[in-house]
Image: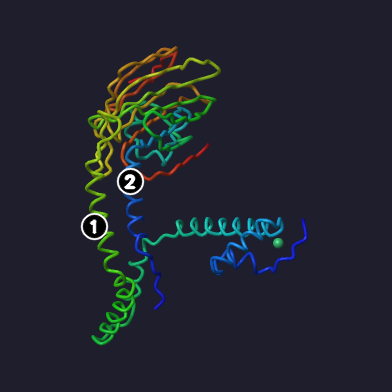
Amino acid sequence: MNTCRLSFPVPAVLVFCLCTASVAAEDMVHIRVETVLATDTSQEFDNRLTGMRSQLLAFRYSAYRLVQEERRQVEFGKQANFSLPGGRFLQVVPKEYVNEQIALHVMLMEGASPSPLMSTLLSIPNRGMLFVGGRKHQGGTLIIRIGAAADTLPPTIIKTEE
Amino acid sequence: MASCSHPSQLISLVYDNELDEARRYAAADQIADCPACSHRMQLLEHTHEALCQTLDEEVSRLDFSDFWPRIEQGIAAQPPSLASQWADRFRHWRMQWHAPLSWHIPVWATTVGLCLFAAAVSTQLPTSRGAVHIQTARKPVVVALNNQAQIESLSATSTVLVWNEPTSNATVIWVDETLGEKLP
Ligand SMILES: [Zn+2]
């Protein structure tokens, strides 16, 4: 039978690489930014938002549509930049991970102004989230959900534009 | 391109490593001195690289998740079998798996040993960020039940309202100069 013959160090090297890769992956933070356009013009609820339906209902709009979703994997201290609808810009910098809390520096930029519209340093639980909202866009209001996880999740980058 | 008097097999012989050491060095020198051969060698390398990359991508796209279930379905769909048929299948299965798994038992022993060692080391690795420590043990992926943020600082050039959304207690930072009636 024609079997694939691996020479001695190959499995060992593979295992070592896998282990070091998994350690390196633990030093990354997975940031997920979902941008929702909330309006009162219809009763439409985007079924891609089913997972946050109960959260969105607290905002008291009648229609919600996902306009953008983006995931990034970023090292502590490094920036994750997200372009938002209406020429806005969100910057998230994971600072540290202590006691199951991820410290984040979140900045929301708008227009040509060099100073951020909003800048905050806060901690959220691992795999937790926060909302930044209130900006007007296309007759509605943007609600941005920012999630962060300090453990290994699928490192995919998904981006859906309207 | 400059004319080339080298036999066309020269490149592939070197590339496939089919020459002994002395001839390989001599051939490599000839290739290096000949622009036409160097170009062909480069082309071959690029083609090989592109091919490997494409194959890697294709393989990574393959979905093996339903491989065994489909085999099981296939077996189940067969007519009721006699004990001898099962014995045949078992023998076939053993022949298939015994050969690849039996080679170099020390290799697998070393691999398993290294795996255990690496696992032990990685769970005790001190992190370089001082106080920051990330546990390497896998936990089930669940979202946080209480999302309330601890805000250390917050500044804005517009009116800002902060509250917690009631179902998951997620903190909401509302940046709106008009502060509509939409707020809870
Ligand atoms: Zn030549």
The image quadrant of residue A126 is top left
Task: Please state the quadrant of the image where ligand 1 appears.
Answer: bottom right
Which residue type carries mark 1?
A: Gly
- Kindly report which numbered mark, 1 or 2, lies closer to the viewer in this rendering: 1
Left or right, B135 with respect to B13, comes to left
Q: Position of residue A94 (x, y in %)?
A: 36, 29
1 and 2 marks in contact (CB < 8 Å): no
Give the CA distance from mark 1 to mark 2. Answer: 18 Å
Chain under numbered label 2:
A
Above or below B75: residue B67: above
Quadrant showing the N terminus of chain A: bottom left
Q: Nearer the viewer, residue B38 or B102?
A: B38
Q: Identify residue for label 2.
A: A22
Element class at badge 2: helix
Q: Identify residue for label 1.
A: B113
The image quadrant of residue B13 is bottom right
Q: Position of residue B140 (x, y in %)?
A: 25, 45
Disc number at residue B98? none
Q: Position of residue B169 (x, y in %)?
A: 27, 27
Task: Report whether residue B156 is seen.
Answer: yes
Chain under numbered label 1:
B
Q: Nearer the viewer, residue A14 or B60?
A: A14
